[in-house]
Amino acid sequence: MSSDRIVAVGFLTQHDLARLGQGFTRLFPVKDDASFDDLLAKLDLVSATPVGPDQRRDHR
C-alpha cells in the first residue's frame, strides 16, 4: 500500500492551476459539461466554519 494519502479533492480552473505553480503535478482534467452543475450549486451554499487550533483533530 502506498504511503501517499489523499488529503484534498477540488475543482480547479486553469487560473487556479497557474496560481499553484509548477509544483502541482497530479491533476485529472474533466470535460467542460454540465455533469457537476448540481454538485457545484450545492457546494456554493456551504458556509465555511473556522476551526481553532484546540478543535483540530490529528488523524495520523
Image (tube, grey):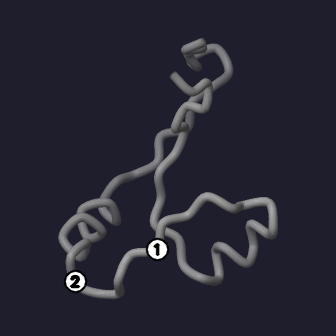
Q: Quadrant of residue 53?
A: top right
Query: Please, what is the three-letter code of the amino acid marked with disc 2?
Result: Ala
N-term-proximal mark, 1 vs 2: 1
Res. 34 mark = 2
Query: Do the CB atoms of the residues marked 1 and 2 lie less than 8 Å apart?
Result: no
Q: Quadrant of residue 54?
A: top right
Relative horizontal placement of residue 44, taking residue 51 as reference (left or right): left
Residue at the location (80% across, 60% down)?
Answer: 23
Residue at the location (24% across, 62% down)?
Answer: 42
Q: Secondary structure at mark 2?
A: helix
Location of residue 48 with respect to 36 vertically, above or below = above
Which x, y percent locates residue 18?
A: 73, 78
Q: Residues within 10 Å of mark 2 (few under 14, many from 20)?
A: few
Quadrant where the C terminus sits is top right
Relative horizontal placement of residue 10, taking residue 37 as reference (left or right): right
- Residue of label 1: 29
Residue at the location (60% across, 32% down)?
Answer: 4
Which x, y percent locates residue 20?
A: 74, 66
In 3D space, how far apart are the residues under numbered discs 1 and 2 (Cα atoms)? 14 Å
Residue at the location (57% across, 27% down)?
Answer: 2
**Viewer-nearest residue: 19 or 26:** 26
Location of residue 33 with respect to 35 vertically, above or below = below
Which x, y percent locates residue 7?
A: 55, 37
Query: Please, what is the three-letter code of the amino acid marked with disc 1?
Result: Pro
**Viewer-nearest residue: 22 or 36:** 22
Location of residue 36 with respect to 50 vertically, above or below = below
**Viewer-nearest residue: 52 or 32:** 32
